[in-house]
Amino acid sequence: MTVLSIIRAVCGRISLTRPSVVVTSTDRNVIQLFELLQEGAEELARAGSPSGFQGLQRDWTFVTVAAEEQTNTPIPDDLLRFIPDTFYNRSTNRKVSGPLTPQQAQAAQVWPQLTAPYLTYREAESAFLINPTPPAGETIAYSYISSYWAQNSAGVAKAEFTSDDDMTYLDENLLKLDLRWRWKSAKGLDYAEDMATFERARSLALGDDGSSGALNLGGPGGIYPLYRANIPEGNWP
């Protein structure tokens, strides 16, 4: 669905005239609905920590420099938050641990043997830091949640809606439910039931989003299948 179709659908539900345009509209109700839609989308994009909605999950790689502070584009422009436990050094096939707490970072400076030979990462003063200092030229990969929840008609991601034909990586039905209670709240109307409906739908959507593995009550073996030996169950050669 597009921005225009979302606004038109909600207008039909709250007994407002469906607009023919949104972004360039001078109608006060349409302007307010558009701003509330943006607000709701921004908050919805932050839901579901730590892994969020799969539509906003992205992968990133960068190449190390031989210094604690990494300056070779270690963080993408659209980073909202890192997905924990996804950092790996693809050059050495080793995991990169972190983020270090300030206490752990200080301890690593005094006792580097606490972390070596494995790399660790942290953010401080808007810089991405790796300890111990890595060699130059190694490839670090990780997954993150993007702050670019909107996309234009050509499928290019962006930070917000700017055109009537813009679309979103988020669940459009959730945006409609969210917009309905926000509009009622802004107008001083009773919105409690609409808000509760949205929150139930959001919880269900987060539970159904993407896919999940089977839980093994017999132990951790079934939770991390990639860590098991790749051996056939029978008829060994």
Image (tube, grey):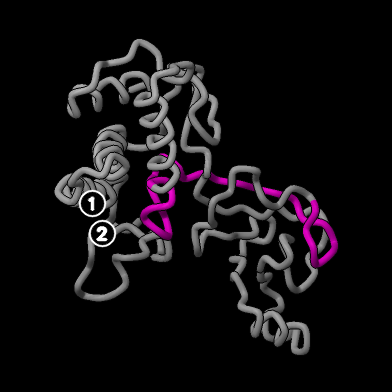
Look at 67% across and 73% down and name the residue there.
118
User: Where residue 174 sits: x, y (%)?
Assistant: 27, 39
N-terminal of the two: label 2 or label 1? 1
Instruction: Indicate whether residue 53 is drawn in magenta.
Output: yes
Please provide percent x and percent y for residue 52. 40, 52
Identify the element where label 1 is drawn. helix
Q: Which residue in the structure is indicated by mark 1?
A: 199
Instruction: Give the quarter of the figure containing the N terminus.
Output: top left
Tell me the residue that label 2 is attached to.
234
Residue span colored magenta: 44-71
Residue kind at label 1, given as amino acid type: Glu
Query: Which mark, residue 218?
Result: none
Give the residue displayed 55% in from the left and 32% down from the top: 158
The kind of residue on which mark 2 rests is: Gly
User: Alpha-carbon neighbours of circle 1 within 10 Å: few (<14), some, or many (≥20)?
Assistant: some
Asked if residue 91 is among those painted magenta in the image, a careful observer would answer no
Q: In this view, does 34 lie to the left or right of 172?
A: right
- Relative depth, front residue between 190 and 36: 190
- Depth check, front residue: 184 or 177: 184
